[in-house]
Amino acid sequence: MNQNTQNLSPRLNQNLQSSGSQVELSELTGIRGVFLDCINDPFSNGSNDSLDNPSAENLESLENSSIRYIPDGLLVLNQGHIHDFGAYSALADRYPNLTLTHYPDRLITPGLIDIHLHYPQTQMMAAYGEQLLDWLNQYTFPMEQSFQDPEHAAQVANFFVEELLRNGTTTAAVFAAVFPGSVDALFAAAQARNLRLITGKVMMDRHAPPGLLDTAQSAYEDSQRLIERWHGVDRLGYAVTPRFAPTSTPQQLQLAAQLLAEFPTVYLHTHLSENLDELAWVQELFPGSASYLDVYDRFALVTSRSIFAHCIHLSDVEFDRLADVNAAIAFCPTSNFFLGSGLFNIQKAKSEGRSINVGLASDVGAGTSFSMLKTAAEAYKVAQLQHQTLSPFQLFFLMTLGGARSLHLADHIGNFELGKEADFVVWNLQATPLMAFRNPGPLPTTFRELSDRLFSLLVLGDDRSVSATYIMGQQQFDSV
Ligand code: GUN
Ligand code: ZN
């Protein structure tokens, strides 16, 4: 046994024994700094993450909270995974020769998770003047045609992945285009940076320009090939991706469900109930269905591995159905404002007796920013307009652990639990003159200050606030 292992805590020794492998202490690295993560859902009852709670004044009360805050912490990494985590004072002696990176005046959080966006739309963000259906016809479809060219797809995919990292997003569920090569390009770009990424070929066999259409059968076969090539390789996952009900024939939706049956661990990723004209059109196209969600349900596309973007105009019955099957909702506030689609009712999803998995999503290119901070700030405003309040910790949950749970990845990512993959972001809370003016002095020492600082980061921060982004313990973006 390596001499240094004498220094390991009993807990750690136990872990090592149970995993059956011996860890070379010399291979460990450490990050020291100020850490914040979510260890549970702050929307669920019984949490004390409220400033109305008098005991929440001091940080010790975080013991029973869904939030964990460690003002001087140590994250010990082993081959890209979290080997140990806690207060620096408690852990430092156990790791005497650790190669340490110290961020004394930075906040470190888990990597952010964006559960719905479109990489082919990167270059058409800020397309003026239309709501969903006209926006698709006028801007989106022509832009997506250019992804027939694999070189163009590769160029945009590389830019897109760099943009995610620059914004602190370390996991994303992404629409590609209808062309299988567009999926290869994005998977390759993510794989090259060891990024966790879910994508899939858009399935679309009607109501789009001829150059963008597949057929029910070709979509099935292309998706099958892509799943076999990419799903479960490294950190990559596949999503069967019918664009939305109006652009797929019943036969195509049926074959999408067949793919889910053949490959039970792939995802289903689509749009649901975004715009009122879209809803009316769906009713026309599928007159026998009780609701928009029911269209997908009748084709067996509503499962625990389904991700539905938007969900603005859902009935209570539809919300109940999503809760029953444990499906996920992608809350896309900047997109919903931009296209004038409406206000997502998070209270219906997360309270009123329901606890639906909800994650935050940029929905680039209808969304107006890659920054999940800006996305969270807009989510707050969506709630405000409905006389609801989203706390800073609830917003933080939606873009970390909540996103991980929505994607069934909480065993791997979402917080700093031991054994998880070490994706994290180093934040500068004083990145701009305004932020420095708003947040003078040291990092928080009380719960109230922490909540305030976090909220100011969400509302005032953006890509300039990211000092560094780490993927599995390796720095993949550095602001300097
Ligand atoms: N519904 C169908 N396709 C799209 C899309 O590309 N973006 C958005 N926001 N909604 C859609
Ligand atoms: Zn979308």
Image (cartoon, rainbow, N blue to C red):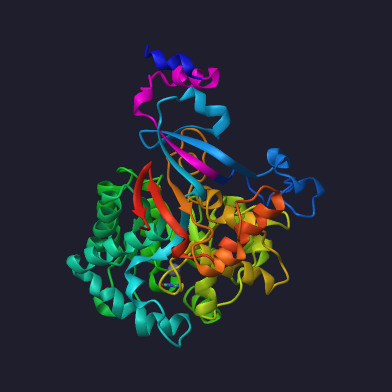
Among all residues in the image, which is located at the extreme front? 441
**Residue 331 magenta-highlighted:** no
Q: x, y percentage for residue 272?
A: 51, 67
Name the side, left or right, on which 301 lies relative to 456.
left
Horizontally, residue 271 falls left or right of residue 318, namely left
Task: Report whether residue 299 is seen.
Answer: no
Q: Position of residue 413 (x, y in %)?
A: 47, 44
Q: On the image, which quarter does residue 213 sit in?
A: bottom left
Front residue of 465/258: it is 465
Q: Is residue 35 above or below residue 360?
A: above
Residue 27 included in the magenta stretch of the image: yes
Residue 164 figure quarter: bottom left
| Nearer to me, 110 or 464 | 464
Q: Residue furthest right?
A: 54
User: Where's the N terminus, which quadrant?
Assistant: top left
Taking the spot 73% from the left edge, 58% from the top edge, the residue there is 352
Q: Is residue 422 above or below residue 431?
A: above
Q: Which residues are magenta?
A: 9-34
Q: Nearer the viewer, residue 435 or 245?
A: 435
Residue 8 drawn at (x, y percent): 49, 19
Image position, residue 59 (x, y; %):
70, 43
Q: Residue at x 45, y 70 (%)?
A: 369
Count of marks placed on residues: 0
Q: Quadrant of the C terminus?
A: bottom left
Question: If the picture is divided into quarters, which one holds ligand 1?
Answer: bottom left
Q: Is residue 66 left or right of residue 281?
A: right
Residue 95 in view in this figure: yes
Q: Is residue 405 above or below residue 130?
A: above
